[in-house]
Image (cartoon, rainbow, N blue to C red):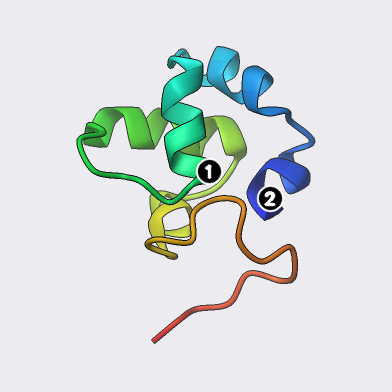
Amino acid sequence: MQLLLAAELRRIDLAAEAGVDLKVVHHLCMGDYLGIKLATLVRVAFALGCVLAELVRRPRKGLLYDRGVLRVQR
């Protein structure tokens, strides 16, 4: 996963850093944002060192998609 790799974090580390349950990180990695509060997404983005838009930019592809350079999808 590109954002986790860039931040040099494992899923469990990200969950601890963001103060969220590991299940939340798992759902985000799978691209499942449904039911996750905006404040939670902001904490995860902050823990990853990115902005919220980078975190949710790729619906249904999640954090595990595309290990290449971040691209804006239009």
Q: State the residue at coordinates (75%, 47%).
A: 6
Mark 1: few, some, or many residues within 10 Å (few <14, many ≥20)?
many
Q: Quadrant of residue 56?
A: bottom left
In front here: 8 or 31?
31
Can you give x and y, in whole percent of width and height, for residue 23 in the image?
A: 45, 22
Q: State the residue at coordinates (44%, 14%).
A: 21
Mark 2: few, some, or many residues within 10 Å (few <14, many ≥20)?
some
Whether residues under marks 2 and 1 lie with C-beta atoms below 8 angstroms apart, the answer is: yes
Can you give x and y, in whole percent of width and height, for residue 7 in the image?
A: 72, 39
Q: Quadrant of residue 4?
A: top right
Q: State the residue at coordinates (31%, 45%).
A: 33
Residue 9 shown left or right of residue 3 in the figure:
right
**Mark 1 — residue?**
29
Picture quarter with the C terminus: bottom left
Q: State the residue at coordinates (63%, 69%).
A: 70
Q: Secondary structure at mark 2?
A: loop
Residue 43 versus residue 17 in the image, above or below: below
* Disc marking residue 1: 2
Q: Callout 2, which amino acid?
A: Met
